[in-house]
Amino acid sequence: MASGTNQNEENNAESNEENEQVPDWLSAKRGIRMLINNNAKEAQELFCRYPDSLTMFAGYSFATFMDALMTFEDDKLNLATSVLKEVERKCTSETGWFKSVKKVFGTSDIHRSLAESLETQIILADSQVCLAILTFLQQDISGYFKGGWVLRKAWKVYQSTYHDILQLHKEIVGETHTPLPGNPESSPETTNSPDTSKSDNTTNGYIKKIPYSHSAILTHHQNDSSGTSTPNSMKNNCSRSSIDASALTFLKKSFSVNSALSKNAHRSDWSSFTSSLSLAYITSTFHLFSSTERLKSAEIDKPTIERLMGAVSFGYGLFQLGISLLPPSLLKLTNFLGFGGNRQNGIACLMYAREGVDMRAPLATLSLLWYHTIVRPFYAIDGSNVQAGVNAAMQLLQESEAEYGQSALFLFFRGRCNRLKSDIPTALKSFQLSVDNASQREIKILALHEVGWCHLIQLDYCAAENTFTYLKSWSRWSRAFYSYLAGICCGSCENSSNYANIKEIKTSTVSGSKGNQLDEFLCRRAKCCPSDDDVLAKLPSVFWKLLVYEMLYLWNALPSCSPENIENIKRDCEAIRDGEIQEPMLGLSKLILGCCYCIQRRYLEGINKFRICLEQRRNLPNNAVDAHVSAFSQYELGSLLIKSFDTKAEGKLLLQNISHYKDYDFEQRLNVRVHSMLKHL
């Protein structure tokens, strides 16, 4: 719940709306509320009503960014990128080198513009984090380097702004009381082992709240691979000299060997990076020139500094949370660039931000719901315990019921909670209500996507086929993905004689390929899906069911299946014996069967099935097109063996040797899990 002082400020501002000018931050929050409460058109009209307001334009950029992430459609991604770059340009025109020098020497009106300057810095960092996320979605080497550098710029701005706001907060308000962020010098990841469902410092769904100094976050520096942290004295000496110099050299070399870029592109990209470095350096060191007397003398009131504290906590928390989810290969890049991420810090900052009155407060709630209901189960942060984040998410939804009870987005997350609890009928009702209430086509598609997956979890193949066929014709994000889902569901339906959806798997994969990880996954699946009518007629339905079960496993949805359906899945997998029935990939049935036994807590039988799977595949190359079957079987086996003292050494060796497999499906995601598990042994 919001603090009393801040809530009174917001209520007073709204009640006086007709009598005096409404502050931009409150108008922006109204726009965000409209957007979340199914009034996207009205929200956009409100944002566009104030073209000269940076705060309102920032609100509009959040709206376009959310739209892009929900759809992944090229036109939405391009629009969001364009808008965020314009936000960055507007911010840097207000915080450029010349204006920074003027502020250093006291030629600007500090009393009048300090709050605006701090808000501009927050907006700048927020826009850079959002830009970096969109850049990472390119999923190529150039995108990773550019995204990493943009994140470094954001990190520098956050540090500087956080320092100034914290100092003002201590002088004007006092010491902060915020959620517990965890040890700031701890590892950036939390453990992914199945029995760590409370790894995010939650007690009955809430994050513990104790007195805590925000300065601890400022001193956080990611641990190196050996587990030791950099001493503070060394950080102060290295952060602006050796790191910046090394980063310049490193990035210059990286771009010089990138054959995808032309010589002209090298020059322009390098020029933009060096100019960006200058700006990042100026903004990150600005607080060093700002005296305590300057901050003390600034005419900034208590409600404003409290609002800004919540505002900067949102972006900083999202930054920390996002970085903590990167695979080990990218964590090396972030380490090199001089910043890291701590998952518990990120969650704590978002919890703090959602209690404020700034326009980012509802966005912080949405971010936490996204983390607890989508990220945690998909990345298997809590192993097979997909319900680990449900209690926290349900309490967030309960607290937001009065304000966002009919929001299509909040109904979507309610459906996700019910799905994770295996309450599929209730989940379907929530998703259908989300579809009915949504004013945006993108949210309708998002909810219908979940409807299809609910049918898949119920093993209702025909209903799932109908939903995915509909999405295939309506979605512009990945028609190939929905074609594949519709095709394998079609083949799983008993006595199905309509092979149209199955045949379309190959054609849609070729036409829809963009070269990202999902498209690579679909191309590999298309190779094992025949399209000849005679061959299709001879294939039993269990062949296609195994591909459905593989999807449920890879998306960590198997634990959401009912006990009855787990038995049905086991029966189908056990039907694959001695080559009597063809399976799409060698050993796939044993991998699925082992996971089903683990869901039933029959771990010894699960271990046996994983060993059989690895034995069947021992002569296959480590970069085989279906090498993920071996890699995931080895991970599942290793994660079970390390729980026993007698087999811990063998389990650890199995986990370490997973790095021998290369270029397989979901490689980066599995590496995150393995890296985290080994780190906590």
Image (spheres, rainbow, N blue to C red):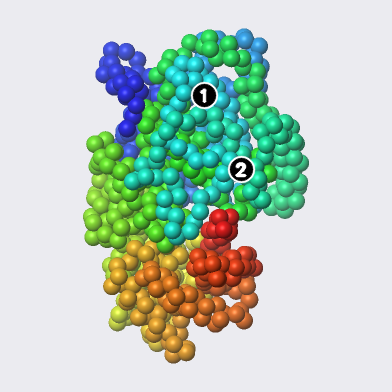
Is residue 157 visible to us here?
yes
Q: Position of residue 156 (x, y in %)?
A: 61, 32
Specify the quadrant that holds the C terminus. bottom right
Residue appearing at x 51%, y 68% in the figure: 644
413 vs 677, nearest the viewer: 677
In the image, 380 versus 456, the foreground residue is 380
Residue sitting at x 33%, y 49%? 391
- Identify residue type, mark 1: Leu
Residue at 27% across, 42% down: 398
Give the x, y percent position of residue 563.
30, 70
**SS at circle 1:** helix
Tell me how far mark 2 sits from mark 1, CA to CA. Answer: 21 Å
Viewer-side residue, 61 vs 197: 197
Classify residue 461 as left or right of residue 212.
left
Label 1: which residue? 166
Residue 242: mark: none
Residue 49 in sight in this render: no
Q: Residue at x 42, y 50 (%)?
A: 198
Q: Is residue 246 left or right of residue 174?
A: right
Q: Which residue is tagged 2? A: 222
Q: Residue furthest front?
A: 645
Residue 471: quadrant of the picture: bottom left
Q: How many C-alpha atoms fall within 10 Å of the one at disc 1: few (<14), some, or many (≥20)? A: many
Q: Position of residue 53 (x, y in %)?
A: 45, 23
Sequence-wise, which precedes: disc 2 or disc 1?
A: 1
Mark 2 is surrounded, within 10 Å at the Cα level, by few (under 14), some (14 to 19) or many (20 or more) other residues, namely many
Residue 210, relative to residue 639: is it above or below?
A: above
Amino acid at dot 2: Gln
